[in-house]
Image (cartoon, rainbow, N blue to C red):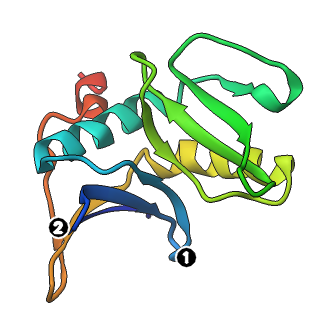
Amino acid sequence: MSRFIISRGALGIRFVLKADNGRTLAFSKYYATLDACKKGICSLTFYAPIAPVVDTTVGEYGANPKFEITRGESGGYCYALKSANGKSVLACAPMETRKACLRAVAMLRTGVMDAEVALDTPRQLTPLTVKGLVRDHLKD
């Protein structure tokens, strides 16, 4: 099962989505508050399974929300999930090939569905309940 790990740092609060094997699937921007970070997780869990993939490296364009594939600054391919308002919810480290980038998006789509949420504290990971996740409302 995947896990969102929320951590605090000098630049703010952010989450990292880790796969079962411990590999980092994606990381968020820095948020000013824990509540804003939780809303980022809500946005990700809602949009990731349904957002289309738009590959700007081959000239594709599309409306938000979307997964946007771009070329990294140092080469390679990167993706970002853009929410309905056009802001990036998360991004990834550059990958060598377009195929690897598309595979990572596919893993992310399934990885968010049942992901646990934990707060990284100095002593341990503390399970965190994120009330009112968008996916919870979809079950009704």
Crowd tier of the residue under label 2, counting other residues whose Cα lies within 10 Å: few below 14, some 14–19, many 20 or above = some
Q: Is residue 2 in sight in this rendering?
A: no
Residue of label 2: 127
Label placed on residue 75: none
Specify which label sits upstream in the sequence, 2 or 1. 1
Q: Give how far across and how far down residue 18 sits, in percent.
A: 46, 66
Tell me the residue at 62%/59% (across/down).
Answer: 93
In the picture, which quadrant includes the C terminus?
Answer: top left
Residue 123, picture quadrant: bottom left
Could you say whether the residue bearing mark 2 is in a helix, strand or loop? strand
Could you say whether the residue bearing mark 1 is in a helix, strand or loop? loop
User: Label 2 amino acid?
Assistant: Pro
Crowd tier of the residue under label 1, counting other residues whose Cα lies within 10 Å: few below 14, some 14–19, many 20 or above = few
- In this image, 76 relative to 12: left or right? right
Between 69 and 128, the one lying in front of the other is 69
Label placed on residue 21: 1
Residue 126, picture quadrant: bottom left
Tell me the residue at 38%/51% (across/down).
Answer: 114
- In this image, 121 relative to 58: left or right? left
- In this image, 65 relative to 43: left or right? right
For the residues labelled 2 and 1, the Cα–Cα distance comes to 19 Å
Tell me the residue at 52%/34% (across/down).
Answer: 81
User: Label 1 amino acid?
Assistant: Asn
Tell me the residue at 77%/27% (across/down).
Answer: 56
